[in-house]
Amino acid sequence: MAWELNNDKPIYVQLMDYIRLSIISGRYGAGDKLPSVRELAHTASVNPNTMQKALSELENTGLIFSNRTSGRFVTDNSALINQCRKDLATQYCNDFFEKLKSLGLTQSEINSLIEDCRQELH
């Protein structure tokens, strides 16, 4: 099944986001070996060079590392993974609040809406 990619931002960035999310959500655990570039590219229906660029950029962040003879692996640094999780959650929250403010809701209305939603979930 192909990954859902769009024209909103560069493909390699979307691939990075997808792999990062797969790591911080636990699909790929700390220390896990990632599929090969070709396997990932085939799954995402992208050119292997594009996938290679995404993986290289993720290596630069320290979230993954490569072993020349064995492939690429997720970092064992759980603090880094947790920080990435927190950063993404913060980004989601900021986006959420900006969208609510763009609807013209006041802070009080936003707080009330969040409380109503929280109660519905429990």
Image (cartoon, helix red, strand yellow):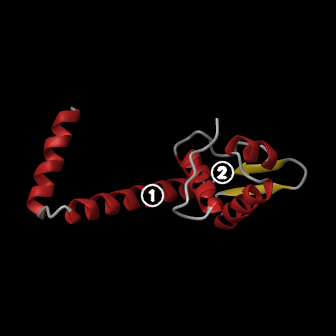
Q: Nearer the viewer, mark 1 or mark 2?
A: 1
Circle 1 SS class: helix
- Give x and y (percent) for residue 25: 52, 43
> Quadrant where the N terminus lies?
top right
- Identify the residue under disc 2: 76
**Residue drawn at 8 percent across, 60 percent down:** 108
Q: Taking 1 as reference, is 114 above or below it? A: below
Q: Taking 72 as reference, is 91 above or below it? A: below
- Is residue 33 found left or right of 106 in the rendered image? right
Q: Residue furthest top?
A: 122
- Give x and y (percent) for residue 40: 73, 45
Foreground pick, 54 / 80: 54
**Residue drawn at 55 percent across, 64 percent down:** 9
**What kind of residue is marked 2?**
Asp
The local crowd at label 1, few if under 14, some if 14 to 19, many if 20 or more residues have their Cα within 10 Å, is some
Q: Residue furthest front?
A: 7
- Give x and y (percent) for residue 12: 65, 61
Residue 34 appears in the rendering: no
Q: Residue furthest right?
A: 69
State the mark number for residue 52.
none
- Identify the residue under disc 1: 88
- Is residue 8 found left or right of 46 in the rendered image? left
Foreground pick, 49 / 91: 49
Foreground pick, 35 / 51: 51
**What kind of residue is marked 1?**
Leu
